[in-house]
Amino acid sequence: MTKAARNAPPASLAAQKRFHAHPFDDDKLKEECGIFGMTGVTDAANFVALGLHALQHRGQEAGGIVCHHPEFGFNSARRFGYVRDNFTSQDVMQTLPGPLAIGHVRYSTAGKKAAVIRDVQPFFGEFSRGGAAIAHNGNITNADALRRELIERGSIFQSSSDSECIIHLMARSLQKDIPSRMEDALRRVEGAFSVIAMTRTKLIGVRDPLGVRPLVLGRVGDAYCLSSETCALDIIGAELVREVAPGEMVIITEDGRVESRMPFRPQPSKFCIFEHVYFSRPDSIIGGRSVYETRRQIGVELAREAPVDADLVCPVPDSGTPAAIGFSQESGIPYAMGIIRNQYMGRTFIEPTEQIRNMGVRLKLNVNRALIKGKRVILVDDSVVRGTTSRKIKEMILDAGAAEVHFRIASPPTAWPCFYGVDTPEREKLLAATMSEDEMRDHLQVDSLKFISLDGLYRAAGEAAGRDNSCPQYCDACFSGEYPVAPSDQIEKGFQLKAAE
Amino acid sequence: MTKAARNAPPASLAAQKRFHAHPFDDDKLKEECGIFGMTGVTDAANFVALGLHALQHRGQEAGGIVCHHPEFGFNSARRFGYVRDNFTSQDVMQTLPGPLAIGHVRYSTAGKKAAVIRDVQPFFGEFSRGGAAIAHNGNITNADALRRELIERGSIFQSSSDSECIIHLMARSLQKDIPSRMEDALRRVEGAFSVIAMTRTKLIGVRDPLGVRPLVLGRVGDAYCLSSETCALDIIGAELVREVAPGEMVIITEDGRVESRMPFRPQPSKFCIFEHVYFSRPDSIIGGRSVYETRRQIGVELAREAPVDADLVCPVPDSGTPAAIGFSQESGIPYAMGIIRNQYMGRTFIEPTEQIRNMGVRLKLNVNRALIKGKRVILVDDSVVRGTTSRKIKEMILDAGAAEVHFRIASPPTAWPCFYGVDTPEREKLLAATMSEDEMRDHLQVDSLKFISLDGLYRAAGEAAGRDNSCPQYCDACFSGEYPVAPSDQIEKGFQLKAAE
Amino acid sequence: MTKAARNAPPASLAAQKRFHAHPFDDDKLKEECGIFGMTGVTDAANFVALGLHALQHRGQEAGGIVCHHPEFGFNSARRFGYVRDNFTSQDVMQTLPGPLAIGHVRYSTAGKKAAVIRDVQPFFGEFSRGGAAIAHNGNITNADALRRELIERGSIFQSSSDSECIIHLMARSLQKDIPSRMEDALRRVEGAFSVIAMTRTKLIGVRDPLGVRPLVLGRVGDAYCLSSETCALDIIGAELVREVAPGEMVIITEDGRVESRMPFRPQPSKFCIFEHVYFSRPDSIIGGRSVYETRRQIGVELAREAPVDADLVCPVPDSGTPAAIGFSQESGIPYAMGIIRNQYMGRTFIEPTEQIRNMGVRLKLNVNRALIKGKRVILVDDSVVRGTTSRKIKEMILDAGAAEVHFRIASPPTAWPCFYGVDTPEREKLLAATMSEDEMRDHLQVDSLKFISLDGLYRAAGEAAGRDNSCPQYCDACFSGEYPVAPSDQIEKGFQLKAAE
Amino acid sequence: MTKAARNAPPASLAAQKRFHAHPFDDDKLKEECGIFGMTGVTDAANFVALGLHALQHRGQEAGGIVCHHPEFGFNSARRFGYVRDNFTSQDVMQTLPGPLAIGHVRYSTAGKKAAVIRDVQPFFGEFSRGGAAIAHNGNITNADALRRELIERGSIFQSSSDSECIIHLMARSLQKDIPSRMEDALRRVEGAFSVIAMTRTKLIGVRDPLGVRPLVLGRVGDAYCLSSETCALDIIGAELVREVAPGEMVIITEDGRVESRMPFRPQPSKFCIFEHVYFSRPDSIIGGRSVYETRRQIGVELAREAPVDADLVCPVPDSGTPAAIGFSQESGIPYAMGIIRNQYMGRTFIEPTEQIRNMGVRLKLNVNRALIKGKRVILVDDSVVRGTTSRKIKEMILDAGAAEVHFRIASPPTAWPCFYGVDTPEREKLLAATMSEDEMRDHLQVDSLKFISLDGLYRAAGEAAGRDNSCPQYCDACFSGEYPVAPSDQIEKGFQLKAAE
């Protein structure tokens, strides 16, 4: 071993190598988490495993389950990788007994410190009157300040995760019962959060006062569950009871009673509109509305706002598909699968020595060459982040002999980072932060490029009158730069809010 | 350990547990193999890994690569599981050096003996003038007889695979050079086969005289490759040179010369028509024709042959998608994603104690409930094998509140087993072997059920005049019962051919 | 999966299964830990891995290393199993860069809760002015009380280990620098401890005021190390500087200065005499005295105190060997390897259905039958704990045809549990707690059984005048029941101290 | 990945890395195999696992078990690594059911081709009237010629192992029953071999006509076993029935009948004398004689032949121990453990950057410094092969302050390679092939160096009159250069036999 090799950075950790970001997916915004909890069955962890599997699109890096059994106490398992690979063997699942369990899947926050298993939620704390575990979806905008204060007072953090602040705040609360400790803790927290927690006997769900991140309550027989999305209710055959309301805490007891508390000052709701555009699964229902239908309607709106004469409407798979269907239906231009996705895509391959252009993309996507040749093609994608993928796809399509390439994007230009639980590049790397729509078109060298308008997006999401600019119905900070909660840690680090107009 | 546990059958092998068939996929016909070979690059195995990854849909149970390096000789790696998981690490790939390599992915032949790594191809044999490796796609219909004869004469088989006969026949050939040994061996073999082989210096491809299974020749720069399908050429940026002809042997030398031999008696070609319907990837090109376009055209034909008044045309994902698009375009009924597939589907989960109906299917598929409710739905699927999945899907759709369910199937009734390299249930388990179309409809309890006609399928595949019943242009034995090569091992075991009409 | 299986206790964790106690070793006292630290080299973790390997006899269940690099910060690895299996690959070791590292090996404390990786030391804490890691050998006798208090005040424990109290007490100290925080913390701790700690720049070693557990300071070139025993200095070629004194804290800075502090009230030293008898490796030097020579001298003393006429002196391998050599030399009776140890012994095997008597012992030990037959045999063992192994060995020897079996034990009767870092059975399971020497002889059905006297042991350990009963030179509580520090947690749980005489 | 790295030789196979030879052990001769078979119990594989564990000293690289069950047929498992790690889990063992099983452990033949699992015995072949498996200990001296012939005739070898010739010869035999096929095959084989084989119902053992390698027959209850050594009978509680005679084939049937055949022309027996010196375990019995006692007697003979005035007699652990005891007893010089062996030694560690002299040896051995200082030390070792380790040990002892170092070697100078199943360096690397005893002493820079004489060795092994030079009672070719079977493959490659005197 050479000295150079020995001094290699710890970034070469095996765990990291195996779960590095996929070259293609790097150009998408990433939801950081999915959460699920279950109570009232004999083997709650099996239900949680299924629920997390249905929420895998919200986070693929790692997953964890904590459960409680009256005899065997709290047990947990945390693993890197997919739920299907980690929580399906009898060896693992029989170490997770009991009627009450919660779980978490998370996305790798690339570029940060090395992934370590201690960062994988749920977090667990033993308090003076019993333990509790929490799973958190969202982001705490004053986490740095809270962490500094807690360490100063003698708390020892197990992880590099901001979410751990919540459990330390709970440990220091002078309240006796755990729900009240949670109230104390969450009142000190700023930002966006949906939290599922458990004590030895209770399952607890909370949403922040703005309701930025989703959380729903389901029931199967006499048993209850909490989930980020309704698609995870379907997989276990549960019915949707209702969404947990913004600012609400629900407490479900062993005997199936559901208590509701409202620990926060009421505020106008600001649900994340990007859940409609991209994060949620198309078979989930948000606010009584099919996510698939909203996306199809975005395509309809796009076809009205930005029509173009062409031969084929092709989705960029898989997320552009519903909008492409809507665009085709509204425009009358035939829908076609011009780009095929390799369903076995996983990790990256070792590239052959002789460089092959666009290999990164072709591993995941391939053009249907015979179909595309000589055609004027409309490509419908969900968003443009850095623009790197859009350019490669354009080249693939032109290589295959397309006559024209027109991009239609199912979201407005993404010009601002999200600080509420979504992984976005720094602002200067967002294509739309520095270029106008025309500049982006020229940069991507396509025949045309159009984004849906903010009003069009709101209409597709069911707001017939479009966006209420005085008090927007959703959080759309990534498009508008209007942040409903001040990102205080970021401001301290120098982030510049949008200048008032 | 109790005595009972100790006497457990070896069926509990860990390898088996991890790769058991998926409950949903069980009701599909399975291609048993994909093959790929490369010569003329510095690191052929990396190209083969990429090629096999693009062919993963042809076999997911296991994969193997054999390569040759002038200094390090022959090396190989064989693994259970996906290419992406086994042939992407530097640790493995640097043990596979050299300019010449071939590879194989295979499907698990469920119900047979335990999967063992010795059964994973390519097979390798050391002959008196040097070694050779072969990878085989297809099935040898006189394998039992050949195997008996070879064992009687003192050959020792390493595997339970019929394909191993070829390498033993080659070992016993009195020819000196390996291509001539292969000719000797393959002339004794009956059935359907595409074979890729390699010596220390040559890459060899052969198709059986009927050309049942596909094989194409590609070129990237000065280097050549052989592949089951063109989609694997795309992933490495190779261009399609041509298909290897039925009955042809191509021999590619180190310095890039391509020699062609015709070792068999010429026969009319009988390409497998099911490659068009289901096996091949939609972005592959067969006979100059886009597979996707043929499938879309099947939907068009189906809409003409079996129209029905309805609100939505929904594919059973993913294989029914192109035909559903064609059906929608021809019928004018809107296309919609009524069923959503979980892209993270993998192994089976431990089911919660309280039985949940249809869990098997819901792990992979979920209904878009808000979309389906109250609608008359046309479901387009590629085939009906046992009918088990069709029934579950129908129930899911009805549970979601559909008003009517109409099945349209993109292939004729599958009434006969394949003996040419496709895994089919025994004849009595094929729904169409024992029921008429109407009986199947009643059995599945759907509002209507229609299969495309054989003639319609041939038209969609480009035969404008339909099927030439005196000498069909394709092998369609699974639909027609007309086997172009007598399945002699099966007949010996009691299989009844279709009575002459 | 049956309901019964699903409700199996989490005790079936794979990690536990693989590292369960060996059937034979179960009847030994176990040292719970070995610790090692290094500073002043470019790759301290490699030195620590070697040091821990040399200390593996002090703990085989798990090991951990924490290191610090100026650029890459703190990194750590914790694993179940042997050092040789976990800390030898480049993959792991290159994730542990930097000039400063500490490590820990631990013994499995059987019967307690399931082994989890969070319990594996060193523990790490981020404090308000920088992080620190600690590795602890010993046992805190007031840990329960401290833990209760810390949890009440809001500390969250990561592990079930008592040693974690130290790092929480450090976190809550109002001192600024870490050595002073450690002083604060350790002044609140009762019991026996040797601790190695590290900050970003300093390596720190502390022994409790009684000096119960060992700790030595070594030097190799300009670099310094701390170790439980001198045998770990030898493996890295370091020389012994001196023992860390009871009650001393040594602080070694980056530039190689060694500072000494005495934070505790001075007390008479009480080094654990069992380190001489069994725990330490025979090639270690304690108090300037060879451990091997002390053990050989015990054999000499035994031969004088309890002579017997016999044909052979055989050690119970391997720990009885030095005393058997001494017994042979003093008595003139030939030394022989009557019992052979299988050097490949590891985990337990599945026993064949037909029960074979003594299989547990024979897996590890086998009698040299041809040698033993017809002979009067003296067996020299280091100690008798429960007596289960002694009985099996006696039976093996008699089965082989020995004429007489005489046990000579190189320690006094073990009649009291240790609360200072050694794993002992509950008092009622100690054979010597309930039986006299004669009763034990009858219980074991041997021809004679003699233990060395306490005075004889002290003489062998270099105290020519034997034990100073008014103020014993060593901690010998396991033999005498005289505990130098009150085991307060145990007393609270009902443990009865020896009645005053 | 750089081009250089990509072109790395396949020598970097993971399997190889993990099982490379230990730096210290490299200077020992290695037995290549241990074999064990069992019939007549319900779970033979569990007995075989225990037997192989007891024979682990004969081969540590890999092990395999083949078994047969009337219902489940033949099953097998082959693994790299120790028996204790591979054949102890229920997962593996329950895949090996049935009343009949055989197994094999093998030593890594370093320097040859990469270790692959196909080389791990037992080998299995399906013949025309049923399958058989064989496990071979020894070496076939005409294997190259046989292999060439078999390949020429169309046999395909699965492995690089010479032993595979036997099973191919069996496959080609025209005999019907398997024992007769074995007779046919083994009559064509030259060299040294003990073979254990099994059919579906019979357990078979054979020794070559000279009886070079050991093989014993044991019984436990009504069940029979075959084993390389008696120590493996002890572990399962079996009694020794007798040794299989040179040139004998024993066939044990299901119902416990033992048939004996003598298929070869009778020859004077030539048992390997090195089994007494080093290979066999000291608790095994060979020819009615304790191996331990023979080794102790070698020490007695050495003390008589080569006395020296000194303070201590120290064994080089562990193999030198019995001879050192004998030397001490005969000379009256005290025996002492001057060198301590680390019982946890396993794989190699990454060496710290700053080179430490002799690290390789110190990982395994450490000097008892306090004991050695100022003493005149006699070191007793079993053999000198290349002399590399002897030199390192001498340096360790002098570093520790010894006044004089005298080597006494328990075997004559090893001057010739073994071709009968022992891994020896090429002749020119054997120290004794090129140097006289005095030259070796000077080369090693020790105060004296003496080897036991051939006659002394024969006397210690029970031949009171010493070696019968006209017809030696043992194979001692490694010392004498007198090969009882011509090593024909080697001669063909240029090996020079000793010139006739």
Image (cartoon, coloured by chain):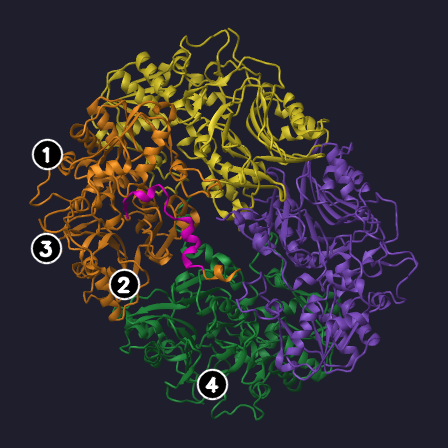
Chain colours: A orange, B yellow, C green, D purple
* Residue C137: quadrant of the picture: bottom left
Q: Write down the residue under mark 1.
A: A464
Mark 4 is on which residue type? Lys
Quadrant, the C terminus of chain C: bottom left
D177 or D299: nearer the viewer: D299
- Where does the image place residue C34, in percent across and percent down from the top left? 48, 72
Residue B7 sits in quarter: top right
Mark nearer the viewer, 4 or 2: 4
For label 1, the crowd category at 10 Å Cα-Cα, with few meaning under 14, some 14 to 19 and many 20 or more, is few
Q: Is residue B179 above or below residue C361?
A: above
Subunit under mark 4: C
- Residue range of the region highlighted in magenta in the rendering: A8-31
| Mark 2 belongs to chain | A
The chain holding disc 1 is A
| Residue C152 drawn in magenta | no
Label at residue A265:
3
Residue A130, numbered circle: 2
